[in-house]
Structure formats: C-alpha cells, structure tokens
Amino acid sequence: MQNSTMDKPHSPFFSVIIPTRNRPGMFAAALQSVMMQDLEEKEIIIVDDGSDDADLAQYDEIFAQYNVASANHAPITVSRLMRRAAGHGPSFVRNHGVSLAQGQYVCFLDDDDYWTDPTYLRQAHQSLASKQGVDLYYSNQAAYYQDGTRCEETIWIEDLIEKRQYYPTKDRQVYETSAADLLQSGGFAHLNCSIFRRDFFISIGGMDEHIRYESDRDLYLRAIDQAQHILYDPHIYSWHNIPDHTQKNNTSTRVSILEKKVFQLRTYNKGILYGRHPEVIASCRHGKSIQLKVIAEELAQQGDYPKAFAYAWQALADGFNVKWLAYTVYLGIRKCVPTKKAIPIGEGGTAK
C-alpha cells in the first residue's frame, strides 16, 4: 500500500473520501466536482483499490494536474491499495479512507458520480458549525440513466419532502429529524449525500466489510439507530449515474441476484438483533421478509422447490399474508412432486 500527500491540510473541517478502481475518466469528473467546492476547510482522500497499470497511468496524469495547481486548492492524499482480483470491497476501501481522515466530518463520493452544487460543503458547514454534536447530515441527489434521462422514481430519501413536509426553501433551511421520521421514506440515504461526524462513524464500527452489496444501507440503518442528532437538507447536491447492467465494472452489476439477497439478509438480521429503536427493528423485519420472498421466488424459477419452500416458510414469520401463505403451500406441494429427469438423446434422436 502506497500513500502520497499533496499539500497536507491543517485541521480540515471535512474529509472527502473518493474510492476508485479502473475508472479514471469518470473519476476525473468526481474529483473536479470536489475541487470546485467553494469551502476551503476540506481535504480530499483518494483510495485506489488496485487499479490496472494502464489505468494507473491516467490517474497519475490527473494527480499531476492538481499537484501543480493553485495553493488555494484542497490538499489531496492518494492511497493505493495492493491489487486483488476482486478488489478489497467498497466497505474496506471507505473504512481505510476514514482511517486517514483528519476532518471533524467525513463525506463520500463515488468515482462514477459527482456533486452538482459548488456550495454543498459550505451549506453543510454552516449548519454543522452552528449546532453542537450533530452526528449525521443527509441531503438528496438526482439519478440519471445512461442516456441522460432522469429517473423520476423515489430511490433514496427524497420522498421525505412530501411525507414529512421537509420542503426546500430559498434560504436553504435544514431540518432536524430522527430515525422514526427517516424510516417513513421508502429508501435510504446514498453515501454521496451523507456526512458523518468522524468520531461517530468510528464509534459505530464504520462500514461492514463482510457486505459487498448495499453496504451503505447497512451503515444507514445502524447510523440512524444510534445517532443522537440528525439533520436533513432536502436540496439536491449530487448527480448519480445509474449503473449500466450490461457492464461488470461496478458492485451493483458484479454481484448475482442470490448473492445480493444474502448480503441484504445480513443487513436486516443485524438490525433485528442489535437495533435500539422499534422503528428500525420493524423496518428490518419488513425488509428481511421481502428478501426471503425474492429468494424463494428465484429458487422456484430455478426449479429448486425444497429450498424455495424453506425460504418461503421463513418469510411468513416476518411478513404474513394469505396470498403468501397460499404460495408457500403451493411450493410445499411442488417439493413433494418428483422432478422428471431429462432423458439423454442420441445422435439419431432416440433415447438411449
């Protein structure tokens, strides 16, 4: 692992962590969006998760550009991790970035996304500096498909604007909120729009390095469950590129359906077992039931009815309804029916 520092900071308020791997072109836009932030009290920590040699050369060109830039630019720390075939995972990389952070608060930005408002950190700084002991600060982002079309569906916590009347205002009003209020949303806060008090992030154990899909949901549930003081800014500050599912260069597309469900079950089981707020526990029970049902349906499509029945039965415990009971009974019947074995056909088209 190699670390290099360009103009090491003096007591930054924010540490902005950008994990990256084999995406220098998109990374350049992400980095530029952070450099354009009009707040000086920040440092940037870039963690390269073992990029290939060809891409490293392009990264070096980008770093060289900012190494000779104006002294007004934010200091940059670059940490290069040892190369591994599948990388170290998104949680490990971000935890490593936090371990290098000097700021009071840590922010994250994916290397294929970027911040759209150069006042984002300044607005957050004004709110955080004016209040004592804020653990979490959430805001919103817009999601776009590969053709540039904006997704109009609720993905994260933007629906709180209507559900909790957290309306955007001209004076950029920020709202105090809670786990119970946040869980009225149908989603969870993306890391691009999440700011953590660094000591709080460390105190809750950081990100779960055993989870390689939706580790940000796990962090979100644990964070809102344990935070004492949470702020919500309803404004949009980030552009999120919805992953291209034909590609395998991001976490969302590298992990199979059943693997995703295993990781999600870990998240919800932790929330049920360790949750403090009843709303968090209830949300995790509901989420677990949904994932168990998806697993059961996927296994049924694969013809594995014994396993499908087992998962369907578990789902009843956390999300009973008559329709699902009927489906579970159906799977129970199917698992008792012998599956016909395929008869090998010879070259002449007759069974051997």
Image: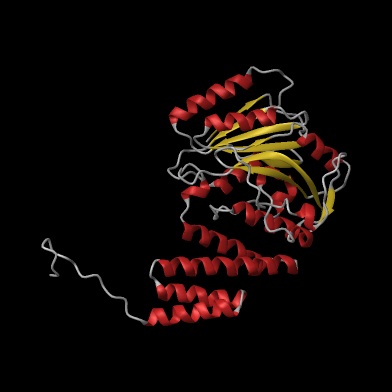
Q: How is the image coloured?
A: secondary structure
Q: Measured along the vertical axis of the image, is residue 237 above or below residue 230?
A: above
Closer to the camera in the image, 1 or 213: 213
Closer to the camera in the image, 45 or 110: 110
Q: Quadrant of the C terminus?
A: bottom left
| Residue 347 appears left or right of 291 | left
Looking at this view, name the residue that lies furthest to the left. Answer: 348
Closer to the camera in the image, 91 or 257: 257
Residue 25 makes an appearance in the image: yes
**Percent position (x, y) of residue 232?**
79, 49
| Residue sitting at x 40%, y 79% | 334
| Residue sitting at x 54%, y 69% | 292
| Residue sitting at x 78%, y 52% | 161
Image quarter of residue 17: top right
Task: State the count of labels.
Answer: 0
Residue 102 makes an appearance in the image: no
Q: Measured along the vertical axis of the image, is residue 238 above or below residue 211?
A: above
Q: Measured along the vertical axis of the image, is residue 175 above or below residue 305?
A: above
| Residue 20 appears left or right of 76 | left
Image quarter of residue 96: top right
Q: Measured along the vertical axis of the image, is residue 66 above or below residue 158?
A: above
Image quarter of residue 75: top right
| Residue sitting at x 80%, y 40% | 124
**Percent position (x, y) of residue 229?**
82, 53
**Percent position (x, y) of residue 295?**
49, 66
**Percent position (x, y) of residue 338?**
32, 80
